[in-house]
Amino acid sequence: MTNHWVDIKNANLVLVMGGNAAEAHPCGFKWVTEAKAHNKAKLIVVDPRFTRSAAVADYYAPVRAGSDIAFLGGVINYLLTNNKIQHEYVKAYTDAGFIVRTDYTFEDGVFSGYDETKRKYDKSTWMYELGADGYVKTDPTLTNPRCVFNLMKTHYARYTPELVSSITGTPKEQFLKVCEMIAETSAPDRTMTIMYALGWTQHSVGAQMIRTAAMVQLLLGNIGMVGGGMNALRGHSNIQGLTDLGLLSEALPGYLTLPKEAETDYKAYIEKRVQKPLRPGQFSYWQNYGKFHVSLMKAWYGDAAHKDNNFAFDYLPKLDKPHDILQVFEDMHQGKLNGYFCQGFNPLAAFPCKAKVGRALTKLKYLVTIDPLVTETSTFWENHGEYNDVDPAKIQTEVFRLPSTCFAEEDGSLVSSSRVLQWHWKGADPTAEAKSDLEIVAGIFLRLRGLYQKEGGAFPDPILKVTWNYAILSAPSPEEIAREYSGKALDDLMDPKDKTKVVRKAGEQLDGFGQLTDDGKTACGCWIFSGAWSEKGNLMGRRDNSDPSGLGITLNWAYAWPSNRRVQYNRASCDPSGKPWDPKRKLIGWNGAKWAGVDVPDFKPDAAPEDAMNPFIMNSEGVGRFFVVDKMGDGPFPEHYEPFESPLDVNPLHPKNPKAKNSPAARVFKDDLDQFGDAKEFPYVATTYRLTEHFHYWTKHTKLAAIMQPEQFVEIGEDLAKMKNIKSGDRVRVRSIRGFIKAVAVVTKRIRTLEVYGKKVYTVGIPIHWGFQGLAPNGFIANTLTPSVGDANTQTPEFKAFLVTIDKL
Amino acid sequence: MALQSLDITSRSATTTPSPGVRQTQKVAKLIDISKCIGCKACQVACMEWNDLRDEIGTNHGVYDNPLDLTDKSWTVMRFSEVELEKGKLEWLIRKDGCMHCADPGCLKACPAPGAIVQYSNGIVDFHEEHCIGCGYCITGCPFNIPRLSKKDDKVYKCTLCSDRVSVGMEPACVKTCPTGALVFGSKEDMIQHAEERIVDLKSRGYNNAGLYDPPGVGGTHVMYVLQHADQPQIYNGLPKDPQISLLVELWKGVLKPIMSLGLGLVALTGFFHYVTVGPNEVKEDANENQHGR
Amino acid sequence: MLSRRQFLQFSAVSAAGLSTSSLGILGFSATQVLAEVRQYKLERTTETRNTCPYCSVGCGLLMYSLGDKAKNAPAEIIHIEGDPDHPVNRGTLCPKGAGLLDFVHSPNRLKYPEYRAPGSDKFVRISWDDFIAKNADGTTVNRWLSTGFLAASASSNESGYLTHKVVRSLGILAFDNQARV
């Protein structure tokens, strides 16, 4: 979230799209009801289903699963055509006036630089025109036809209300009604917040759906504002924290990146990531990359990381190719992996195409699962009839199943969607022999390190020299680890303005990432978390909930990254002169000497408005991007492409170009190509989702949740039910090309038949949550049905739009 | 512990006055259906607090689960898909459970002394150790709430968390409610709160928004804010004008002493069955669910 | 209308009621009514603050445990409800959070390390030492390219950080967490 949960109460308009906050995040959704009750806010829900969020909405519009870019592109077109944008904001704080290279093109659905055989773009043309000074050329009058604003206008002019309605199935008048309501928030003192979740991420064009929405928010001047922002509602309690800590194949903690295989030169590695400003006077925060990286390496390798060995740069593994989960299971399926560890994760249930995942697991030599609960993954080799039809005798994988503690039995911190790090305390001892993840990981590590000490090997240093200075080697305490990632001074740190003054003495905890250095004098395991445990103690455990401004900003409650800031980009809540766009909802302002207010300013604190420094300091442009240059794999402007399994034969935007039917840059593995279903055999659009009564694949193990929603079901509309002679309560089989599930049918008015590009589209709703382990009656793993294709940027699987057929049993 | 024993307004089948020297504040729970997202947190919190676990059932082709109130499910959400205007679908979700009537039909009908008690704060509580399992309270209830346990032949229903209320806490369902659709306080404050909600709903086009506090049972200590107060029955059969059956009134006033002296209960129940009419509708399948597990 | 079936059930039940408490209805006299409410169950409990492990709202929890943590009285959590001081959830919990007690005490919690041999149809209980010895034998390779590690979604920052440090020091690249899906 750019903003935070409580801030939603300040919104004038709430758009829930690509998510179902009332069901998936009920206690966060209370701030929507609060905005409605006390801020006269309106709530719009756009979703293929009339959800429990829609039940309390002021306005609901249906949309075909997978067509959100068309919808939002249409909103952009509406705002530009009807001149409903926050002009001053767009002019000052976005790239609207930046001139784009003349060789950038977009022709019939494909951007310049496309290589069809590699399914990849050469992105070099997706760039601004640079002047001799190295800065971007701009046209503040926005008249140059090659400026971003005009390119964007042309790009989205194609998204007419008629075409949008034809692609999305949203009736035109309903689409226009949503546009009108959204357009009202272009006034500087009105804001819309957008709440989205996996309804946007789980598509082959998921990242671009989110970008399109962010562009809408930039046009309306809603980023950085109280009650505004792009608010990703993360799906698990510490998905935010684990992402922040970089537990992803290509990442390092704090959104630093792992070197690629070719990046053997340390200096070049750093230089590539130090982004120089693209506008004069601009401040580009990533210029500090070296400080963050060196401090990380000092935290991991201590004295073994020093200037002479490039701070142990060679100890880091180098990325030879992507290793996202789809790739890893593809490799596993090809027999290229021996061992696999699953820590609190149930891939057999959570990954696409269960059959493929199950087969892949049989090819492992060993599998280790670590979890408080029984998981389907840990028993993938067990025969459970139709639910898991395997022969244990034929499966040679060794399985180790390890019991871990649950939340109630450990201390530690989690990061909420609001980016707030909150400490929690143990209430009881672990059950039986369960151990904490810390102890389990430490146990494995110490044993391996011992073996390397004994046996040596070609390059044991990265293992032998990693810092392990914990009081109890086999049980590092959460407190010790928290201090390590928050960071400390290794040497006395001097005030850069007064070299005689010591800011932090050697050994002291740091106040924040502003104190990090690239000379090895500081150690910090995750720079964005820096300051969470300072000399003042564990700030994550703070419990002062006072909210002096009444805007819901509780700076003394726990600790938010970065720098305890609660609304990101809050400099943009003020006009260029430093006055808030909306004086009634002031976050920060320029007081003549510095930026100050009720939130921690997201800006250089002493940069005066006349310095003309722009608010988005994490971008080297300093402004928000409509044209995202080379940052995305599938295009600098979002374009609607059909899901890989679509009920349509063509992309209605490019009916004559089959290459532009689906995302041209999405990766598809060879074996998966023939695993896409055709609309003739599988005519109905399926989408998977959570129900409010359950959490993922966990709560089927809890009796209370099993009572509330006991048995697997699927939802269909009344028209499809009539066609297939299905009544509520009947048992049905839902089949995709990859497999089938059986479930109870819920026939409902809440799923409408949509008119899409001249044909009727029927939607089948498939709740996840069931499996062959649990207190709830056994069910089929919903991902039996889903395709193994991912987004072109994130490789997140396309769970939200695929094809099935349905029959009464 | 017996804090409330001085706060009693009435007891079932008891002729002597109740110890009611102390008058406590009248309380009420307000259920604002326009804020309800049907998440069932109230159902879970109710079972968890009361240390009950209902059976793990099946799906009946609807979101409602458990499908009906039981001796262990003292509150359930009832889901209704309603299209009052063509093309304008509404998903009305009503939390069902004891209404804590000011004039409780269950208490009036109950022949077991002290099995049903009404505190001066308005809570109607069952004291199952005195319950004889006759089921008259079920017949006497205009909302079809109490449920007989197969396990012990006692009747159970929502206590409005009298144990929590007695130590100054709100009921478990109210505390947990994520969206604030449930609120709890003095009846006066709840009516005031409802009025504010009704103004908001009217401003959003719900011209018939209103409070449900039916006078036929003397008002209730559980009230609803309805978007369509003119049609309570669209909320899964909420009775438009609930009344205590005339027969219960008769039984209470004249017949009960005579009956209690000698008449067999079996015959009496038959009599009840014969004349009970009105809003107390029980569907066949719901009944099945109630007794047939 | 009451159905006929319901009537019959009532009759049967009533008969049973009579036989078990036949004196119950002869209640003309003022039987002393102990109109007490149920004992408030949290009176002797210890309160511990925690955070809900499910979604990312990060709701504050109050966990109530019995047992005063004396040597012979280990704590057992008997009830969980929302933390009213928490600025986001303000004491509320959703159906999953309100039922957290059943996660802590789920019969499907794992209790011991277990091992399943190739081709076997069952797990056997092993000790932690067995696991470490068995699993780590013969695994000193230079780069762990044939090993993958899938990190969690609800483990703490501290677990996540230590896991990352260990995984990268081993040279593992096939490393992801739930954020990917």
Image (cartoon, rainbow, N blue to C red):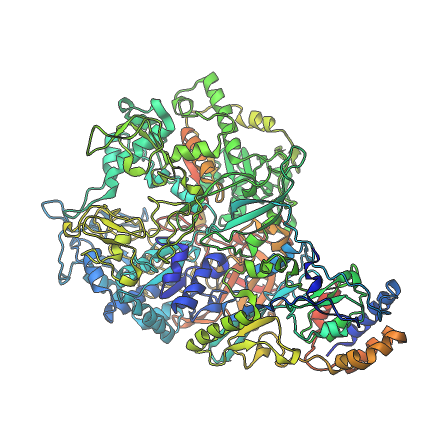
Residue farthest to the left, as pictured: A132
Return the x and y of residue A190 as percentages of the image width and height: 30, 66
What residue is at 22 percent from the left and 41 percent from the top? A275
Return the x and y of residue A134 as percentages of the image width and height: 13, 45
Q: In the rendered image, is residue A63 in sight?
A: no
| Residue A708 falls left or right of residue A97 | right
* Viewport quadrant of the C terminus of chain B: bottom right
Residue farthest to the front, as pictured: B21
- Give the image quarter of residue A572: bottom left
Q: Is residue B146 above or below residue A460?
A: below
Q: In the rendered image, is residue B134 in sight?
A: yes
| Residue A138 falls left or right of residue A317 | left
Return the x and y of residue A775 as percentages of the image width and height: 65, 51
Name the residue nearer the viewer: A515 or B16: B16
How many numbered marks does the figure carry? 0
Name the residue nearer the viewer: A69 or A94: A94
Residue farthest to the top, as pictured: A454
* Viewport quadrant of the N terminus of chain B: bottom right
Q: Is residue B104 above or below residue A228?
A: below
- Give the image quarter of residue A305: top left
Return the x and y of residue B212 as percentages of the image width and height: 57, 76
Name the residue nearer the viewer: A681 or A197: A197
What residue is at 51 percent from the left and 76 percent from the top? B227
| Residue C93 falls left or right of residue B120 | left
| Residue A725 falls left or right of residue A244 | right
Q: Is residue A469 above or below residue A236?
A: above
